[in-house]
Image (cartoon, helix red, strand yellow):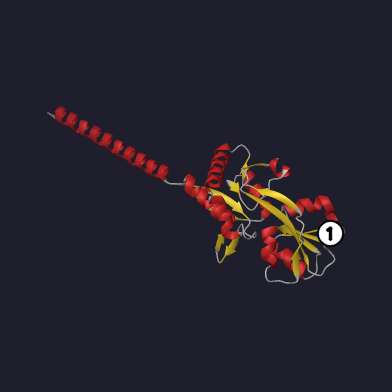
Amino acid sequence: MKKIISLVLSLLLVFTFACGTNTAKTENVAETSAESNSPKTLVMCTNAEFEPYEYYEGTQIKGIDIDIINTIGKMKGFNVEIMDIAFDATIPAVINGKADFAMSGMTVTEDRLQNVDFTHPYQTAIQSVIVPKDGAIKSIADMKGKQIGVVEGYTGDMFATVEFGNEFIVRYPKTTDGFQALVSNRIDCYVMDDQVAKALVAGNDNFVILDSAYAIEEYAIAVKKGNSEVLNMLNSAIDEMKASGELQKIIKKYID
């Protein structure tokens, strides 16, 4: 009789242990399934000093690039976390894996292509020169030998350094810093993206933009070399937005 009771108790223990193990596995599967259904988050680094592409409105970052990437996130099923850093730190952040991509009114250049891959371009932009209205600089040629303000790491910095020489280039960390230097006569001119230049001189009759464009360039999104999954996904979304007219609609919201 004792043997029978012991056998029954042993079977009950085995059954109870087996049920407990199966229940735990089911909960884990459910948790894993719930996690897999959540949209993943991709980190985008930018420099929110480049109106109308990215800029602060109160505590929120807004602009063309922000609207474009949020639209892409909805199309492709991911959330966007925006990391605001210095412009010349954006590509290193992508290379080091701190960000999944960089989007900051960034021009595709041969130098940058050595370090990152770029998506299809989403905007064609112009580099312009801001000068005092009654100053000596009336054309691009007049910039030779003058103190030229640029934002460090921007394409204006790259182009002007090559064309006029490093000794004539004065670099600033922010677009507003460079413009204040121009206002206070510490530099003779300021090279900047055309739309940003227009925003800077708006309402200030003492400064004008030269009629001649300094450079024409294309903006794209920088992705870590070899990250074909993110690159192809972004390219697909950009192409779809171009075809549907959504891309131009976003740009027109900020640029007439």
What residue sits 54% from the left and 49% below the top?
245
Q: Is residue 82 visible?
A: no
The quadrant in which the N terminus is found is top left
The quadrant of the rendering that contains the C terminus is: bottom right
Image location (x, y in percent) of residue 41: 50, 48
Q: Position of residue 116 (x, y in %)?
A: 66, 42
Q: Is mark 1 on a helix, strand or loop?
A: helix
Residue 57: give x, y in percent of width and height: 57, 65
Q: Which residue is drawn at 63% across and 48% down?
A: 93
Q: Foreground residue, 175 or 208?
A: 208
Residue 67, quarter of the rendered image: bottom right
Quadrant of the image occupied by residue 58: bottom right
Residue at figure coordinates x 58%, y 57% from the top left: 252
Residue 168 or 9: which is nearer the viewer?
A: 168
Residue 23 shows in this picture: yes
In screen coordinates, is 139 left or right of 57? right
> Residue 25: image x %, image y %?
34, 37
Residue highlighted by disc 1: 143
Question: Disc count in the image?
Answer: 1
| Residue type marked 1 | Met
What residue lies at 20% left-to-right and 34% top-to-bottom?
A: 12
Left or right position of 50 against 130: left
In-front residue for pair 206/109: 206
Dot 1 crowding, Cα within 10 Å, few <14, some 14–19, many 20+: many
Among all residues in the image, which is located at the extreme right? Answer: 145
Furthest-left residue in this view: 1
